[in-house]
Amino acid sequence: MKILVVGGGGREHAIIKKIKLNKDVKEIFALPGNGGMASDATLVPIGATEIDKIVDFALSSKIDYAIVAPDDPLVLGAVDALEAAGIPCFGPRACAAIIEGSKVFSKNLMKKYGIPTAEYEVFNSADEALKYLDTAPIPTVIKADGLALGKGVIIAMTREEAKAAVLSIMEDKVFGKSGDNIVIEEFLTGPEVSVLSFTDGEVVVPMISSQDHKRAHDNDEGLNTGGMGTVAPNPYYTPEIADICMEKIFIPTIEAMKAEGRTFKGCLYFGLMLTKDGPKVIEYNCRFGDPETQVVLPLLESDLLTVMKATTFGTLKDTEVKFSDKNACCVIMASKGYPEKYDKGFEIKIDPSVADKVYVAGARLEGDKLLTNGGRVLGATETADTLEAAIAGAYALVDKIHFDNAFWRRDIGKRALMAKESK
């Protein structure tokens, strides 16, 4: 089989490494991929949102199956276009990808179908939003409606911060048209949990839970990032909570989307908060999370491509989806200055003995040298029988990877260990 993977980050590298294990896969193309994937896939210089070019390439290369991984091309209709050309895909069509593409849509969906989430109000006028904030409960959460590279959420601890966020999003357009509408939402507290799930629109199969670390620096300090590391499973996510989530969140969401004529197929990501009133949805993503994928897929014992095809063709209920009972930890190595200004072009040296456990996100090839080319450069993932061993192993991998201006958090998994010890 010839497989096409749309995207170019660490998530896509994790998918590609897992897909390679299928004996029927003869060639994998990454569009556009990155330099760190060159030994695992053929890189094609076509951007993830250049949908017409992606379709043309898929047809001319006789692609058998396509995997569309990032949010932008999914929301723009990449799956619709590829399927129209006769190429089966993993991922939702645009009408279903709206569950991430519009916060207003997803919040209204949850309200309509009784899916637990934070209380909220929607605004298309900055003046109305500012007026509401005069009396709204503080702290509060301000969300741009559309996609914003994972950065369109601002937690405001004071009324002044909340109003500044509204003006920044709606008047200054820091997130472009994504800020034409905003959601102002109740500030929830409790442990956060990420649960990715496979679904064919009829059944939903949750994957191993995980815990992301969004802040740039140790002790959850600094700016929000795309994610500085993950552990799996998340110790806060007990079997009892999993049962509640399946009954009150996962199945109702799939059924709600179907009822709306927006049947969701692919990977649906549930961002949850375990509040004193029970689990609630913070956000949906219409695709694999990054870097959650880098800890979840190494624990998948079933064949990934087989499971993906089952979501496409509606046979998930007849397909085994089995995960290891081990633990995993991923430590992200980033460029100093991320998520703000940072320098690029430093040579990356990865000890060959650990290369199979490294997922490259921001790198380019120059001759035979791999150079940094992004904020989050790579993730190092280890699996082990215990969480302690997985964390220690991930940091041991980091010690075998070098590039100038590298920085990483030293406390990935610390909260998870504390949670386990308190039980």
Image (cartoon, helix red, strand yellow):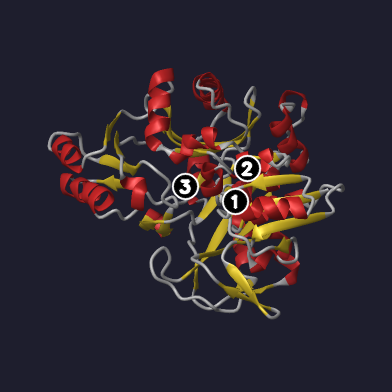
Q: Name the residue under label 3.
A: 415
Q: Name the residue under label 1.
A: 51
Q: Mark 2 points at which residue?
A: 81
Q: How crowded is mark 2: few (under 14 residues within 10 Å), some or many (20 or more)?
A: some
Residue depicted at x 75% and y 44%:
65
Residue depicted at x 63% and y 55%:
53
Left or right, 194 with reference to 204:
left
Mark 1 vs mark 3, foreground winner is 1
Residue depicted at x 53% and y 78%:
404
Q: Nearer the viewer, residue 392 or 173?
A: 173
Say which element carries label 1: helix
- From the top left corner, tell me how far across and down residue 48 is, in percent: 58, 55
Q: Which amino acid does label 1 sit on?
A: Ile
Say which element carries label 2: helix
Say which element carries label 3: helix
- From the top left corner, tell me how far across and down residue 107 is, in percent: 38, 30
